Image (cartoon, rainbow, N blue to C red):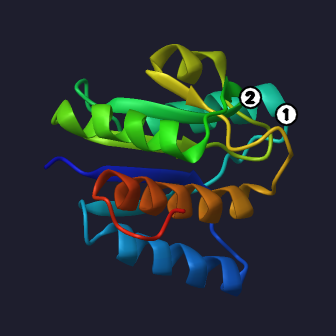
């Protein structure tokens, strides 16, 4: 099983969020390999330059066969059961799935073009750190749904 990689731009600074991320990564790890990587944010102050710098950093960590899922406010906004079904389809492909949460300025068009799937967690806006935690919990929830466990009702 190829597993999932989470690429996060910048460090998770809030301790309670970091603890939650570790919890759900550990729980999801019972079902598939989980790798969390925090990438240094851009040094550029200009938003467009920062997005391009971060895109290059992300793209340099991807393999040609990776399935890339970007978190984006314009992405698909599935209910948890549908997200679980999508996770199942991704896992069945036997390729590494890479989830990417960009930096404070968002994502470059270059990175969007590389994406296989755009995912929105909600129509609400969350901090990037909160989005990390929510994403990990949803991946764990998806795995419990796929395995028929009693976490999701």
- Answer left or right for 8 relative to 41: left
Q: Where is residue 84 in the image (x, y as percent from the top left)?
A: 43, 44
Residue 72 appears at what percent x and percent y?
Answer: 68, 32
Q: Which of 129 and 146 is in front in this view?
A: 146
| 130 sits to left or right of 24 | right
Q: Residue at position x 38%, y 75% from top?
A: 27
Asked which quadrant contains residue 134, the reply is bottom right
Q: In the image shown, does 17 or 58 lie closer to the viewer?
A: 17
Q: Which of 151 and 99 is in front in this view?
A: 151
Which one is in front, 138 or 115?
A: 138
Mark seen at residue 134:
none
Which residue, given by chain and number where applicable, does mark 1 sit on? 46
Separation of disc 2 and disc 1 at Cα?
Answer: 5 Å
Classed neighbour count for the residue bearing mark 2: other residues with Cα under 10 Å, few (<14), some (14–19), many (≥20):
some
Q: Mark 2 points at which residue?
A: 49
Q: In which quarter of the image is residue 46?
A: top right
Pointer 2 and pointer 1: residues touching (CB < 8 Å)?
Answer: yes
Q: What element carries label 1?
A: loop
- Identify whether 116 is placed above or below 148: above
For residue 46, say whether it is visible.
Answer: yes
Q: Which residue is drawn at 51% across and 63% down?
A: 152
Q: Look at 25% across and 40% down and name the residue there.
A: 91
Q: Residue 151: percent from the left, percent from the top?
A: 47, 70
């Amino acid at each position: 099983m190829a597993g999932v990689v989470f690429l996060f731009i910048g460090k998770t600074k809030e301790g309670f969020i970091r603890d939650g991320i570790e919890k759900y990564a550990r729980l999801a790890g019972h079902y598939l390999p989980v790798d969390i990587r925090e990438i240094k944010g851009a040094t550029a102050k200009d938003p467009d330059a920062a997005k391009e710098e971060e895109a290059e950093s992300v793209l340099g960590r991807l393999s040609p066969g990776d399935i890339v899922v970007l978190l984006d406010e314009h992405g698909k906004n599935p209910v948890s059961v549908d997200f679980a079904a999508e996770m199942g389809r991704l896992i069945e492909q036997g390729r590494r799935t890479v989830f990417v949460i960009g930096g404070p300025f968002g994502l470059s068009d270059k990175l969007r073009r590389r994406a296989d799937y755009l995912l929105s967690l909600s129509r609400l806006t969350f901090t990037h750190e909160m989005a990390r935690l929510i994403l990990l919990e949803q991946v764990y929830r998806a795995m419990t749904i796929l395995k028929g466990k009693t976490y999701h009702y």
